[in-house]
Image (tube, helix red, strand yellow):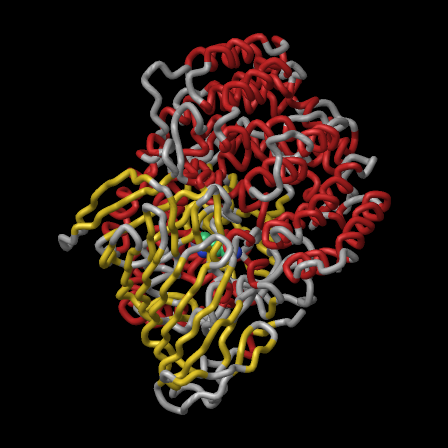
Amino acid sequence: PQTIYLSDYTPPTYLVDQVHLTFRLHPEKTRVISRIEFRPNPASQSREFFLHGEDLRLISARIDGQEVSPDMVQGGLRCDVPDAPFVWEAEVEIAPAQNTALEGLYMSSGMYCTQCEAEGFRKITYYPDLPDVMATFTVRIEGETPVMLSNGNPGATRASFAEWHDPWPKPAYLFALVAGDLVSHPGAFTTQSGRQVELNIWVRPGDEGKCAFAMEALKKSMTWDEQVYGREYDLDVFNIVAVDDFNMGAMENKGLNIFNSSCVLASPETSTDANFERIEAIIAHEYFHNWTGNRITCRDWFQLCLKEGLTVYRDAQFTADMRSAPVKRISDVIALRARQFREDNGPLAHPLRPESFVEINNFYTATVYEKGAEVIGMLKRLVGDAAYAKALDLYFDRHDGQACTIEDWLAVFEEVTGRDLGQFKRWYSQAGTPRLRVSDDYHDGTYTLHFEQDTPPTPGQPDKAPQVLPIAVGLLGPNGDEVRATTVLEMTEAKQSFTFDGLAARPIPSILRDFSAPVILERDTDNAERAFLLAHDTDPFNKWEAGRALAREGLIAMILDGAAPDAAYLDAVQAMARDDSLDPAFRALALGLPSQDDLAQTLHDRGHTPDPQAIWEALETLRQARAQHCQDLAVRLYAQYQVDAPYRPDAEQSGARALANAALALITRTDGGAQAQRQYDAATNMTQQLAALSCLLQAGKGDAATAQFYDQWRDDRLVIDKWFMMQIINADPEEAATVAKRLTQHPDFGMKNPNRFRATLGALAANPAGFHHASGAGYRLLADWLIWLDPVNPQTTARMCSAFETWKRYDDQRQTMIAQELDRILATPDLSRDTTEMVSRIRG
Ligand code: B3K
Ligand code: ZN
């Protein structure tokens, strides 16, 4: 397969002003008739005319009305064209019902839908399928289906056709079409300047009752973007459609967002609190793309984090405003470490702005999204809130309607602040997670922090230069009072020291407050200091972090030295959990333990070979010890945080339920599951029902509830996904592969639906001790299914290969077994470009 390089970027040779598309829908032979107005791009030297096209049957092509016979070449066609504006017309045939890759125009539960980002439009018609070719689209859909939608504002509509016009120039990746038997949950919004916007959430009949929450989230997002970023919506309608078969979460097509049904449909009975929060965040994310992504898009796909990092940052701000900011920050850092640090420390590490790719879909990664958002957060911290706001205003003003680069983005900050962001830009070019080592000393009232940073080598990048690190620091006195409020130290050198004067006694430092930079902090400290910070730190993130470090160090000692559970941790965590002045959601998070994967990475970083079984056993032992230690407290918390009011998925109620369910997990370890069974039987919402099921499964008492759950929910696909996942994620490591294999034989399992595939094979990878079981059964099962899925759906296959990305951490036997599976995948005839790239990079 061909590698594409950022350094090879050239401007498009021809630009497009207007596109007219007519679709004659048919499952096996849809006709797409295009009329495209091209003109030579003055910014391009070349006059070569190439249109992308894949899996298309060309029926006819014309230039300015004259029939032409283009050269059909790999990935598209070439044609001789005038060196002046001209009109291209073509008719092609495609087969949406055969499209199982879910890219381009495909069918899902009888409805037509599209997914074009990144390069799916070329499976719809011949076109310069590049993000910096922006045009206005007029679309006519001819078909039998009751609802036919595309981007922009509606035009004429009859029973047999619908017309749409999108006045905003856009790249083809934002094109969308949906047609089917759909019903709408309607809404309305008036923008700050008085534009009346009709809102719709389109779903399959029967799902109308599950749209109200997403609709409210949409309105809140629209208001928030006006208030916080001054960004207003710009069309007369905003449509969202829920689709069952979708490769990812959702897609920000202009005026017609398409969502995985799991990211939009919600009801208290079928969705957990976590589902509600995720739906709210994704609705916001896709809506926010209207400005950061659509009005201002990317020049080329290497600039992907320009829209994704910024939009993730914006949706995180939104969630922090709607709910609890500290809880959101802590949850985001847990996810960042689990996904992005993992990626950044393995064979798939890549810079925020990659230099090359084979398949761009493989670069919609935790790095581009989550690290991309962290970098925006650092920039804001460095320049301050006021300058950030000014820079964003300038960005929107200057670049509206353009396809931009990271350079354009940084330039507005340089202009507004007068700062040189040359060194900061390394965040976009250097892969890997910086290690930040810190030591301190204290003499005569002066306290000094000494920092050293270095970033380990990553594929293709052996040497790294120092990066700009905003390090938020506060100091506490020995009695627990804060003696220095948070200040942001700006580290730019490999080694740098910062002093604080006039201190009465040696302070206890709280470093990297609010996780002010995405680095791994290394500090020689002791459990007494960690317990002190857990008790006294005023920064909620570092308070949580201190508890987390305490748990982690105790677990590491248990794993490496066979130590007993750490009494300091047990006391400190009990004191924290008992403190009713703390937010219940915070306490629930602080009762969490480092994940198996987190511990494996920490052990590996410290030069040990992680043993997945030993990690799992240490966690089990600590959970058991903690349950015994906190037995009375657990019973008290469980009773105290029951919610009596009618269900609301807001921060307050979800926090109470999270703490009650954390208490239930403790209780289950001492009562054998009796309380969990009572909660399961009495549950009135999915949060309670699923938490109880998970406790029962972990206690080995889940058979009856599992059977009951299936009977209750067999007709709800999204809930049955949970049923598949729960059984595998909570399986004993000895059984996990067997359980997963048995579930792949269940009549409800099918690999064509990505949600179901992820709920089964993805769940196996999310049970590390089971997946990495010494028998190798987990590796074999996953590889088998990846090989089977690849010809059906390359994108989802490639994405799930990352289950193997940590393989170099493990012992020789495991490495040998994984290498065999990777080689077996690579040896599969006709393996997709997507999977070939991923497996080759992982194999190294
Ligand atoms: N922009 C889309 C992701 C497209 C993924 C293509 N493989 C969703 C989002 O980030 O909002
Ligand atoms: Zn996005």
Q: Measured along the vertical axis of the image, is residue 519 above or below residue 575?
A: below
Point out residue 446 in the picture as x, y percentages from the top left corner. 50, 49
Q: Foreground: 543 or 285? A: 285
| The C terminus: image quadrant | bottom right
Residue at (50% x, 84% y) in the render: 79
Ligand number 2: quarter of image? bottom left
The residue lying toward the viewer, choosing from 341 and 702, is 702
Residue farthest along the left direction in this orientation? 194
Q: At 44% across and 48% down in the image, what residue appears? A: 250
At 49% from the left edge and 64% from the top edge, which residue is drawn?
93
x and y percentages locating residue 355 in the rendered image: 58, 70
Q: Nearer the viewer, residue 136 or 349?
A: 136
Q: Position of residue 519 (x, y in %)?
A: 56, 52
Relative to 223, 263 lies left or right:
right
Residue 567: which quarter of the image? Answer: top right
In the rendered view, tell whether residue 183 sits above or below residue 605: above
State which quadrant residue 737 falls in. top right
- Residue 560 lies in quadrant: top right
- Residue 397 shown left or right of residue 572 in the figure: left
Return the residue nearer the eye: 423 or 119: 119
User: Does residue 101 appear to the left or right of 379 in the view shown?
Assistant: right
Residue 701 spot, x, y in % from top left: 65, 14
- Residue 329's place in the image compared with 347, above or below, is above
